[in-house]
């Protein structure tokens, strides 16, 4: 039986936002956000500071729940499940939709224990299984060769770029579906940034990645699709190549050409 384009798009969409509005008390941070993000792609969220891109990212695994007077209207789903349903298991959601923050935040413990931390929380206690997953995750994060001889040394002794890749390994260890990245390279030097970007390109073979970046060059290098945010709205969402070479909206063209932002 032939599959329609609509059915094909439905099966490849992993996160869907429809008419999403987000408020902090009386302030409306996001306005009518409608966007579909597909599996095994990198979606970049770009726009000037305060435009709503990080707020949107944090709605996807309910990190904003901790903010006083935060509320959501509209629809937001992950694998066709309502993210803000009262029956949603938030712990399970954050296991499936992991997050990497702007500054590396390793725990003050060994490199091994950082990666194994989530495994233990989720009940994986056997040392052999932990060993296997720790090595696999560090290899996926392109860090194994640099740390294999110092696994039981403090993670705080790693460089900033290594710490960020360790944090990515920690997220990978619990086998998420989606990885959210909030400006993951903004605190890093150019060489470390390049390693993180290469890692993102490799990881999309197995994961869906959504990245907030202040660098349009980075968005152009690593992403498949790009959403341009301005004043809490998505002005334009398209394939990255189209956004950067043939934007449809004047605001997008003005931003990527450096006229504002």
Image (cartoon, rainbow, N blue to C red):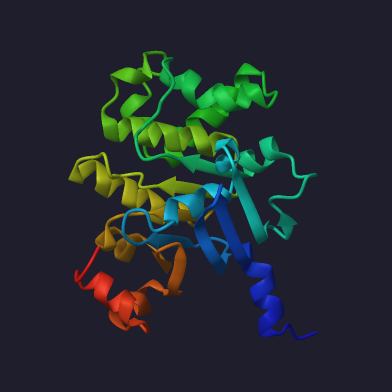
Q: Position of residue 20 (x, y in %)?
A: 60, 62
Whether residue 129 can be seen here: no
Task: Establish if 167 lies above or below 256.
Answer: above
Horizontal and vertical percent for residue 144? Answer: 39, 31
Q: Is 143 on the left or on the right of 191, as rendered?
A: right
Q: Residue at x 63, y 39 (%)?
A: 95
Left or right of residue 171, residue 161 in this image: left
* 76 and 109: which is toward the camera: 76
- What residue lies at 53% left-to-right and 60% top-to-bottom? 40
Q: Quadrant of the C terminus?
A: bottom left
State which quadrant residue 47 falls in. bottom left
Extreme residue in the front direction: 26
**Number of callouts:** 0
Viewer-nearest residue: 29 or 41:
29
Which of the pair 162/144 is nearer the observer? Answer: 162
Q: Is residue 170 visible?
A: yes
Which quadrant of the figure has residue 12? bottom right
Q: Which quadrant is home to the N terminus?
A: bottom right
Q: Nearer the viewer, residue 182 or 234?
A: 234
Q: Is residue 232 above or below residue 113?
A: below
The residue shown at (27%, 70%) is 255
Q: Position of residue 76 (x, y in %)?
A: 65, 59
Q: Position of residue 183 (x, y in %)?
A: 35, 47
> Which residue is at 28% across, 35% downward?
161
């Amino acid at each position: 039986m032939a599959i329609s384009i609509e059915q094909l798009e439905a099966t490849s969409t992993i996160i869907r936002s429809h008419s999403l509005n987000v408020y902090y008390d009386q302030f409306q941070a996001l306005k009518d956000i409608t966007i579909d993000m597909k599996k095994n792609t990198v979606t970049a969220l770009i726009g000037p500071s305060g435009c709503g891109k990080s707020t949107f990212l944090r709605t996807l695994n309910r990190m904003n729940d901790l903010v006083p007077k935060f509320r959501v209207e509209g629809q937001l789903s992950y694998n066709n499940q309502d993210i803000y349903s009262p029956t949603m298991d938030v712990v399970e959601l954050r296991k499936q939709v992991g997050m990497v923050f702007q500054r590396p935040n390793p725990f003050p413990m060994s490199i091994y224990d950082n990666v194994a931390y989530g495994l233990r929380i989720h009940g994986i206690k056997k040392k052999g299984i932990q060993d296997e997953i720790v090595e696999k995750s560090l290899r996926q994060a392109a860090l194994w060769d640099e740390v294999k001889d110092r696994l039981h040394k403090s993670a705080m002794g790693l460089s900033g770029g290594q710490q960020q890749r360790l944090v990515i390994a920690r997220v990978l260890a619990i086998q998420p579906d989606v990885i959210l990245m909030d400006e993951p390279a903004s605190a890093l030097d150019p060489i470390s940034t390049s390693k993180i970007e290469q890692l993102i390109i490799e990881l999309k073979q197995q994961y869906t990645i959504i990245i907030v970046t202040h660098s349009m060059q980075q968005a152009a290098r690593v992403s498949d699709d790009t959403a341009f945010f301005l004043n809490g709205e998505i002005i334009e969402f398209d394939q990255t190549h189209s956004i950067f070479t043939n934007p449809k909206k004047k605001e997008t063209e003005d931003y990527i050409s450096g006229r504002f932002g």
